[in-house]
Amino acid sequence: MKIRMETKQIILETRTDEDVIEITLAMIDLQVPVLHEPRYTDLGYESCFLCGKDLQMRIIHRKIII
């Protein structure tokens, strides 16, 4: 029997690239398991956390260009 993993995605828009790193460190402080280190994707910097046995949360940071 295979359990399906649900993914919730949050997209943050800010002016700096460092925010996703700060969020990742805050989640680690809260002892939320990190599935992978922040990495750059075509959508922006991304970090992924395990928020339960069948739920992962993906945070994508996009830089606002003004």
Image: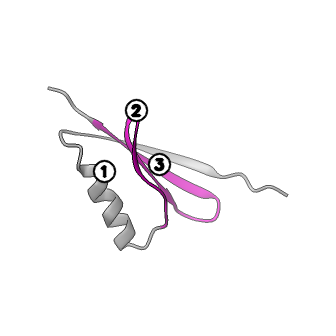
Q: Is residue 19 left or right of residue 41?
A: left
Amino acid at dot 1: Val
Q: How far across and down, in percent of the image, does residue 13 sit?
A: 27, 38
Residue farthest to the left, as pictured: 66
- Checking the image for residue 20, the label placed there is 1
Residue farthest to the right, as pictured: 1
Q: Is residue 11 magenta?
A: no
Q: Is residue 37 left or right of residue 12?
A: right
Q: How far across and down, in percent of the image, does residue 61 sit?
A: 33, 42
Amino acid at dot 3: Arg
Q: Is residue 37 magenta?
A: yes
Amino acid at dot 2: Leu
* Residues marked 1 and 2 touching at CB (< 8 Å): no
User: Residue 21's quadrant in the figure?
Assistant: bottom left
Q: Which residues are magenta?
A: 33-62
Q: Earlier in the sequence, mark 3 or mark 1?
A: 1
Q: Earlier in the sequence, mark 1 or mark 2?
A: 1
* Residues marked 2 and 3 touching at CB (< 8 Å): no
Q: How far across and down, in percent of the image, does residue 40 sit?
A: 38, 40
Crowd band around label 2 with a 10 angstrom C-alpha radius: few (<14), some (14–19), many (20+): few
Q: Say what secondary structure mark 3 lies in.
A: strand
Distance of mark 2 from mark 3, alpha carbons? 12 Å
Q: Which residue is mark 2?
A: 43
* Residues marked 3 and 1 touching at CB (< 8 Å): no
User: Residue 27's quadrant in the figure?
Assistant: bottom left
Q: Say what secondary structure mark 1 lies in.
A: helix
Q: Earlier in the sequence, mark 2 or mark 3?
A: 2
Please name the residue shown 66% across and 52% down the image.
5
Above or below, comparing residue 55 to residue 52 in the picture: above
Crowd band around label 1 with a 10 angstrom C-alpha radius: few (<14), some (14–19), many (20+): many
Q: Say what secondary structure mark 2 lies in.
A: loop
Q: Which residue is mark 3?
A: 58
